[in-house]
Image (cartoon, rainbow, N blue to C red):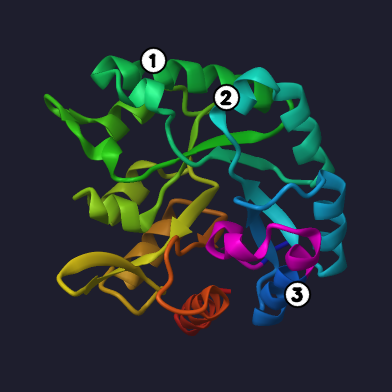
């Protein structure tokens, strides 16, 4: 059964998902835009059961999450149970804890080892585990970046990628090259555009900035990426309108 590739990353509307009532209202707006799936991230203290009920009420699947790495290390059984309740096949973390980041190249290597172990446990429960990058991972250690270390020194079957197009560009990486490099290792990708505003790099809706979307979409298709999660950490206007602009522009580009 095929499904729409487009999912709304709820971190975009985090200020509107802190209570159950607001969460319900936000899910209604997201479904009205046309999204059929969401990434759960940045929501308030809403019970997993209520999250599932609301998602079901509006016909929204949960394709992936962002959870804390410490939580996964210390509460793996609870994390598995929550994702099974949500029928969510993919688990991700939003960043590398600073305890690894502060350790230089060895910190990145240590993270790759520890993340592989977490991913192994999740894989035993038929869940995938992905890492979401920012731009700090593009720091260089001799001939490799931190992101190279993460993916070269972890087990591909246990640590997947949730590449972020904006942050790759922000770090000076080649977005399309990275998508190709992570082919068949990336169930979900984060889409956001980049524009120059007042002389500074800033986030923009898909198709409203300067990234090469025809090339990115072609690379994603070749890399067998299943979900395109639309995220904008900072919006100049209403975040729901931001999600709509990106959705409409991607549909106009032929994304189903």
In-front residue for pair 197/214:
197
Q: Mark 1 or 2, which is nearer the eye?
A: 2
Residue 244: x %, y % from top left: 55, 80
Residue shown at the point (74%, 63%) measured from the top left: 23
Magenta stretch encompasses residue 8: yes
In this figure, which residue is indicated by the disc labeled 2? Answer: 70
* Callout 1 crowding tier (Cα within 10 Å): few <14, some 14–19, many ≥20: some
The residue most toward the left is 142
Label 1, label 2: how far apart the Cα atoms are = 14 Å
Residue 132: x %, y % from top left: 45, 42
In this figure, which residue is indicated by the disc labeled 3? Answer: 28
Label 2, label 3: how far apart the Cα atoms are = 32 Å
In this figure, which residue is indicated by the disc labeled 1? Answer: 110
Magenta stretch encompasses residue 35: no
Disc assigned to residue 37? none
Q: Do the numbered discs 1 and 2 sit on residues whose CB atoms are within 8 Å?
A: no
Residue shown at the point (83%, 61%) measured from the top left: 54
Residue 46: x %, y % from top left: 78, 50
* SS for callout 3: helix
* Range of magenta residues: 4-24
* SS for callout 2: helix
In the figure, is residue 175 to the left or right of 37?
left
For the question of whether residue 37 can be seen, the reply is: yes
């Amino acid at each position: 059964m095929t499904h729409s590739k487009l999912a709304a990353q709820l971190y975009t509307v985090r200020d509107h998902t802190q209570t159950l009532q607001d969460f319900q209202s936000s899910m209604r707006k997201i479904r009205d835009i046309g999204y059929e799936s969401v990434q759960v991230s940045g929501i308030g203290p809403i019970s997993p059961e209520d999250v599932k009920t609301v998602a079901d009420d509006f016909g929204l699947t949960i394709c992936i999450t962002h959870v804390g790495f410490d939580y996964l290390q210390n509460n793996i059984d609870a994390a598995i149970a929550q994702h099974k309740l949500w029928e969510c096949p993919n688990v991700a973390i939003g960043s590398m804890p600073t305890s690894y980041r502060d350790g230089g190249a060895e910190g990145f290597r240590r993270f790759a080892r520890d993340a592989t172990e977490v991913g192994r446990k999740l894989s035993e429960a038929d869940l995938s585990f992905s890492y979401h990058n920012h731009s700090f991972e593009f720091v260089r250690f001799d001939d490799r970046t931190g992101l190279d270390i993460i993916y070269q020194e972890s087990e591909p079957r246990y640590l997947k990628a949730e590449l972020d197009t904006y942050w790759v560009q922000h770090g000076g990486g080649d977005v399309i090259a990275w998508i190709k490099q992570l082919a068949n290792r990336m169930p979900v990708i984060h889409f956001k555009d980049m524009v120059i505003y007042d002389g500074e790099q800033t986030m923009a809706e898909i198709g409203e900035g300067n990234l090469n979307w025809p090339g990115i979409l072609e690379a994603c298709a070749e890399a067998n990426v299943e979900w395109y999660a639309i995220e904008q950490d900072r919006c100049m206007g209403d975040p729901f309108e931001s999600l709509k602009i990106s959705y409409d522009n991607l549909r106009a580009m032929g994304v189903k």
